[in-house]
Amino acid sequence: MTAIETGRRRRPSHLAVVGETTHPMLVGSYPVPVLAFWSGVGSPGRTTLAINVATELAIAGKRVLLLDLDTLGPSIALTLGLVDTPAGLSAVLRLVEQGRLSYDEFRRLTVTIDLGRQELLLLTGLTSPERWEEVSSERFEALLLAISPFVDMVVADLSPPTFAKSSLIHPSIKIQNRDTLFESIVAKCSKLITIAGADPVSAKRFLEAQSYLTDVRGAQEQFVVVNRFRTGAIGANAKTELVESFESIARLRIDAFVPDDAENIDRAMRNGLPLALLKRSSPARLAIAELAKQLAIGGSKAARRG
């Protein structure tokens, strides 16, 4: 990692390092605020963060739909230990297209995660990555319009982009852009939360993808999170090195650091639970709760109308 000038203002060193300025929720062109979680190649913990941020937002009183839009390898249901799940996304999309998605049908096809006084709704993803064409950007927008009376915000777990064209075996043999849905959501979501790992390889991959994101999203900000933060892979000055490298290489501000908390994260996965339901005082959970507070700013429909 390359450091830049030493006179730069340092950040406070607490669990989740959040910038001095907040990122207000953008209205965008969707009828419901969408918080989109993206990471580059590798496994920096994007799905885990999406699940736990959605949980914290629901605990705070938001009507949240957690949506598995990883069309390459949907994993939210597996992470939460869910086996017998409804048809989920595919079934809801069909009903939306037919104009038959009622509140009762919506609740029947979503999984309800009991959070005590609150609840989190989950719409499971595609059963096979070969079915990615079922979720077009047009159908996704129609889905958001249909569920807008039922939810305050959507937390979407996105697949990494393929940066390539691919096609299904189909009589028409037409070539479809595998990243069309991804590009549409990245361009139109209220907030884009991008996740990097704390090791040199993950950070390099993350930074290499930034030119692509800039082409898709333009000058709109992203909320950058370094997940599983630890000093072992980079050294004692890891936080400073990452902050300065992201700023010098890609002009990116790191908004939050979520500490490496493998023991509690692993326990949560074994039990199929969000961290808040397993150990509320775990370091990662405390950082994610603070992160969710920042992401919720301007996130309600009332705030958007105001």
Image (cartoon, rainbow, N blue to C red):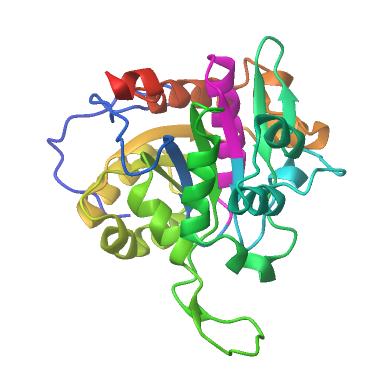
Q: Which residue is drawn at 59% across and 16% down?
A: 59
Q: Which residue is drawn at 38% across and 52% down?
A: 186
Rendering coords of residue 173 (x, y %): 58, 90
Q: Residue at x 23, y 26 (%)?
A: 21
Quarter containing the C terminus = top left
Q: In this view, does 4 lie to the left or right of 80?
A: left
Q: Which residue lies furthest to the right in this view?
A: 84
Rendering coords of residue 133 (x, y %): 59, 68
- In this view, 303 is above or below 140: above
In this view, the residue in front, 99 or 223, is 99
Q: In this view, does 32 lie to the left or right of 286?
A: left
Q: In this view, does 162 lie to the left or right of 114?
A: left
Q: Give the range drawn in magenta.
A: 43-66
Q: Residue furthest top?
A: 117
Asked where in the image residue 281 lies, by quadrant, the reply is top right
In this view, the residue in front, 229 or 175, is 175
In this view, the residue in front, 232 or 73, is 73
Quarter containing the N terminus = bottom left
Magenta run includes residue 58: yes
Magenta run includes residue 250: no
Q: Is residue 174 left or right of residue 249?
A: right
